[in-house]
Amino acid sequence: MTVGLTSATATAESAATAERIDGASGIGDPYWPLDGNGGIDVSSYAISNRYALATKRLSGRTTVELTATSALTSFSLDFLLRVSKVTVDGREAAFDKADGGHELRITPATALAAGSEHTVVVTYADHPAKYSYAGESNWRASRSEVVAMSEPHMAPWWFPSNDHPLDKAIVDVRIRVPMGREVISNGELKGRKVGRRSTTWHWRADEPMVPYLAFFAAGDFTIAQGTHQGLPWLVAVSQGLSATEQRASMRLMKKTPTVIAGLEKDLGDYPFSVVGGLTTSLDPGFALENQTRPTYPAVGGSYTSLVVHELAHQWFGDDIAVQGWRDIWLNEGFASFMEWRWAENRGGRSGEETLRGYYESTDAQSDFWKVTVADPGAAKVFDSAVYDRGAMTLQALRNRVGDQVFWKIIRTWIQEQRGGNGSTEEFEEVAGRVSGADLSSFFTAWLRTPSKPAKTADNGLS
């Protein structure tokens, strides 16, 4: 019994207790309901891992700085590996793995008040290659190299996170590997700590990022770096490739700073403080726009369009992340369009010619037209229609409003959404506001109708 507790105080405390909830196991994205988590907002991740290349075992701990956005009795982080300990503000917390092992449910010793800030430390050790989630087995590793790269999910294989584009955070990465091996990650190399048998590499990005855009690669890499027009760049190529592939890959990676300078002419200032790229020997089958340092398979020295695509993503997808995964065309359509623009600016086919080529050569009955670009569904989130019809939409918009107004729309979108998230509806609003035109039927035809747009001036196709 508490002496002197008034009935009013008791009632208030009872109400506060009743309002406490278990944070939801997902942030609310219908494509992947377990992605992200309810009730928390992460500000930073300090990842400190050790990776044994020979056994493919990853161990370490991640410190998560977060704010409780609701009064919480428990909350979740997205994580697949075996956990041995969790603390919240230095006090040991109860935890369990639910929902097929993707959700790390944490119950702190004391409930979290809404608006309060907390430090969560998760300790773990496991073999990431054992795990899959949402049909994805994303751990790419040999006994001499590893690269943590995938979309829409990658973080849960190597650090606990609030894994959805809506929650950006600062990412600081320390990876310990056997002596003589290199580690590449996002941002700037802050230092190396050399021990008797191992080296710890420390990387940190200055700007907040979405969890899937955080990456690391470990193995034997050749590194080149410099500064171009004031922007520091660092690229790396796996020594696991043949000598010919290494030379070609390094030529391609070294195009990175000049590609950025070219993109800036259309898009304005590059949004981050450093840039780079990495070519892996592991043949992932795709390239990925990891923030500040995309990763690539070995594709030769002349595949500049791939570098253009991934670096365009630094604006579209990284700096401006999607509001939800249904908005993915804002990433892939925009990056694909910038490939068209790059070719146009260098004497290749114009964007209009490329649009016409796609439109005229693709039969109206093709599955290409049956995807709803603004909401393709989880199974078609990376369908070719999302990329190519997304790019077609932008060129058609350019035809509809004129070149000068179109680029004003793009620049306004970048400026207004900088550092945040964007939805299809928000882009439509910007396009209508800047152009002064009613574009509702245009966007309905291109983005929301699963059929070939009519060849009309209203659709930018006259």
Image (cartoon, rainbow, N blue to C red):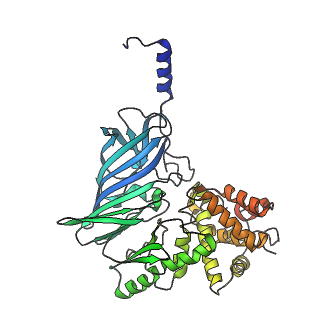
Q: Quadrant of residue 380?
A: bottom right
Relative to 355, 10 lies left or right: left
Relative to 261, 101 lies left or right: left
On the image, the x and y values in percent for residue 157 come to: 38, 57
Q: Is residue 222 above or below residue 428?
A: below
Residue shown at 52% from the left, 80% from the top: 258
Q: Is residue 305 above or below residue 159?
A: below
Q: Is residue 344 above or below residue 77?
A: below
Residue shown at 78% from the left, 61% from the top: 439
Which quadrant does the C terminus fall into? bottom right
From this viewpoint, which residue is outermost toward the left?
Answer: 196
Task: Out of 333 and 293, give the one closest to the viewer.
Answer: 293
Which quadrant does the N terminus fall into? top left
Q: Quadrant of residue 427?
A: bottom right
Q: Quadrant of residue 457?
A: bottom right
Relative to 406, 206 lies left or right: left
- The answer to whether residue 367 is seen in the rendering is no
On the image, the x and y values in percent for residue 332 come to: 59, 67
Residue shown at 39% from the left, 66% from the top: 188
Relative to 294, 220 lies left or right: left
Task: Out of 139 and 235, give the one closest to the viewer.
Answer: 235
Residue shown at 31% from the left, 62% from the top: 175
Q: How many numbered circles are shown?
A: 0
On the image, the x and y values in percent for residue 229 come to: 50, 76
- The answer to whether residue 440 is seen in the rendering is yes
